[in-house]
Amino acid sequence: MIAIIDYGMGNLHSVSKAVERLGYEALVTGDPERILAAEGAILPGVGAFGDAMEHLRESGLDATVKQYAASGKPLLGICLGMQLLFSSSEEHGEHEGLGLLPGSVVRFRGDYKVPHMGWNRLSYRQSESPIFTGIEEGHVYFVHSFHAKPERESDLLAVTDYYQPVTAIVGRENVYGMQFHPEKSGEIGMKLLGNFLTLCK
């Protein structure tokens, strides 16, 4: 069973349906006990970083997510959910994140269109990661105005190019994150999500 963590901010339905299409049982829940009992967990997210962290703290789910990550079972953050894995964000002020991955989330700065929106090609930095098994580099769908800057190069699994290298997939041990929406990214997105789910025993 895969827990889709419901803290009041996230694209829960589409993520849940994508998990079910891949042949897994999905449970949308904000119940800490049910989350901690799941074989895998997904932290989705749509909206602002500060609001999301406030929702997580008020519900106590920030501690649940950290406890889940410490259990060694696979955890995946999607879009804003990936950004929440990091130490901090400068979105509408300075906000503390979950701190599961060291690094910060910063706004795109430059003479180009923000948000970064559309299909962009992935470039694997660590092609040996199990998340990439059987998948060639290809295009996935992004919508974001802020991007993560991991402190550790080893946590950066894939980037895309938007006037600079942009963090697309991160991972360390059992904790993964995807800046794009795999459930909206066609065959490659579903294969990436499927590879994550195969890690959930």
Image (cartoon, rainbow, N blue to C red):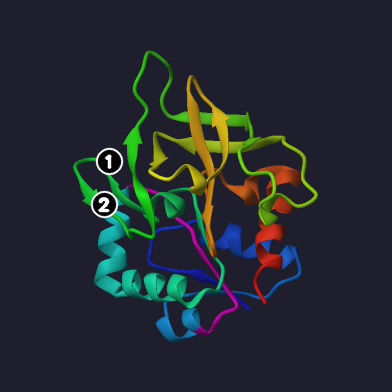
* Above or below for 171 versus 200: above
Quadrant of the drawing holding the C terminus = bottom right
Give yes or no for residue 44 being in the magenta stretch.
yes
Report the residue that reaches farthest toward the right.
Answer: 134
Q: Position of residue 157 (x, y in %)?
A: 57, 45
Secondary structure found at label 1: loop
Q: Position of residue 65 (x, y in %)?
A: 40, 70
Q: Secondary structure at mark 2?
A: helix
- Disc on res. 198: none
Foreground residue among 172 and 92: 172
Name the residue at 52% across, 30% down.
Answer: 117
- Left or right: residue 3 versus residue 87 is right
Q: Position of residue 179 (x, y in %)?
A: 51, 44
For disc 1, the marked residue is 91
Classify 125 as above or below 129: above
In the rendered image of this protein, does residue 80 appear above or below residue 162?
Answer: below
**The residue under label 2 is which amino acid type?**
Gly
Quadrant for residue 96, please give it: bottom left
Quadrant position of residue 148: top left
Which residue type does callout 1 highlight? Glu
For the point 54% across and 65% down, which residue is it? 174
| Sequence order check, earlier mark of 2 and 1 | 2
Residue 140 appears at what percent x and percent y? 64, 38
Question: Is 56 placed left or right of 191 in the picture?
Answer: left
Magenta part of the protein: which range?
37-48
Residue 50 is tagged as 2
In this picture, residue 129 sits left or right of residue 97: right
**Residue at the limit of the structure toward the left, as seen here:** 93
